[in-house]
Amino acid sequence: MNRIIVITSGKGGVGKTTTTANLGAALARLGKKVALVDADFGLRNLDLLLGLEQRIVYTAIDVLAGDCAIEKALVKDKRLPNLVLLPAAQNRSKDAINAEQMQALVDQLRPKFDYILIDCPAGIESGFRNAVTPAQEALVVTTPEMSAVRDADRVIGLLEAEGVGRIRLIINRLRPEMIQMNQMIGVEDILDLLAVPLIGVVPDDQKIIISTNKGEPLTLEEKLSAPGLAFSNIARRLDGQDVPFLDLMSANDGLLTRIRRRLFGG
Ligand code: ADP
Ligand code: MG
């Protein structure tokens, strides 16, 4: 069974594209055939995070215009033969494509891939609709900031209204030391506010910024760093494996137990 998953958030800059790139690479490393679809027309940057920007010849717009077959537009990742990117056009407005066209692109990819991950633009307008329309599942990314959590809540409501079946939450850029000093909302509080299950927590880490600039997702590393491991674990959970949560909160007594109880009952 192939899976079509949108990575979304409402708020910009919370880590959607970072998540798409890292999960794509991690799933490909698990041996899955993965297509990443950049639905952020106008502000595309998934190609940069993957280090594939130099190799783009055609984009989704060329496919829709009938100028090339979808296979020609797919950029293959040399490091991972089963990972491809369908690039968005650069310098196009968000209205360069509509929901039916996005659906048509995904329908063409569908028979050939185990996972299709769609990188959603910020906001809840047409670009959001385009990215969400073909999706069966959603990963909602938030950071531990009230503005991001509120936008995530809004987006979860919209996803439910769109009939997206399985919605799960990623909390990105967590800083345990700030939570301990009561300067940041904690995982537990976010889970109280957003009634969707957690699939993973990713620490705030400058390695992510370095990897973004190098065009090398952290999940490609031989020896995984903490954020790389966090993303890799999310990929495995997505793929149905039972992976314990990282102990980002070791000093915060009992929190993980409480999270687990919330997630899995007991
Ligand atoms: P979005 O796609 O939601 O707009 P991005 O994935 O482009 O967000 O991330 C926005 C910025 O935040 C980037 O510069 C990225 O490197 C940085 N970033 C994302 N996640 C983390 C993290 N866990 N730790 C540190 N920086 C991060
Ligand atoms: Mg983005």
Image: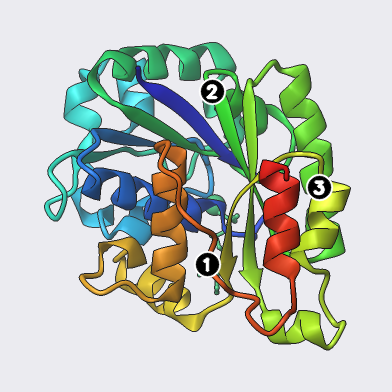
* Residue 152 point in image, percent of width and height: 77, 46
Q: What number is the disc on residue 151? A: 3
Viewer-closest of 63 and 102? 102
**Pointer 3: residues within 10 angstroms few (<14), some, or many (20+)?**
some
Report the residue marked by disc 2: 135
* Residue 260 point in image, percent of width and height: 67, 54
Amino acid type at circle 3 is Asp
Mark 2 Cβ and ligand 2 under 8 Å apart: no
Q: Quadrant of residue 31?
A: top left
* Position above or below: 255 against 136: below
Residue at image coords 27%, 60%: 51
**Pointer 1: residues within 10 angstroms few (<14), some, or many (20+)?**
some
Total numbered labels placed on residues in the image: 3
Report the residue marked by disc 1: 246
Q: What number is the disc on residue 122? A: none
Residue at image coords 23%, 33%: 33
* Position above or below: 201 against 167: below
Residue at image coords 52%, 18%: 134
Mark 3 → mark 2, Cα distance in angstroms: 19 Å
Residue at image coords 36%, 59%: 48
Q: Quadrant of the N terminus?
A: top left
- Judged left or right of residue 218, residue 192 is right
* Position above or below: 166 against 170: above
Q: Quadrant of residue 149?
A: bottom right
Amino acid type at circle 2 is Ala
Mark 1 → mark 2, Cα distance in angstroms: 28 Å
Amino acid type at circle 1 is Leu
Contact? badges 3 and 2 (CB < 8 Å): no
Label 1 SS? loop
Instruction: Give the number of the mark in front: 1 or 2.
Output: 1
Label 3 SS? helix
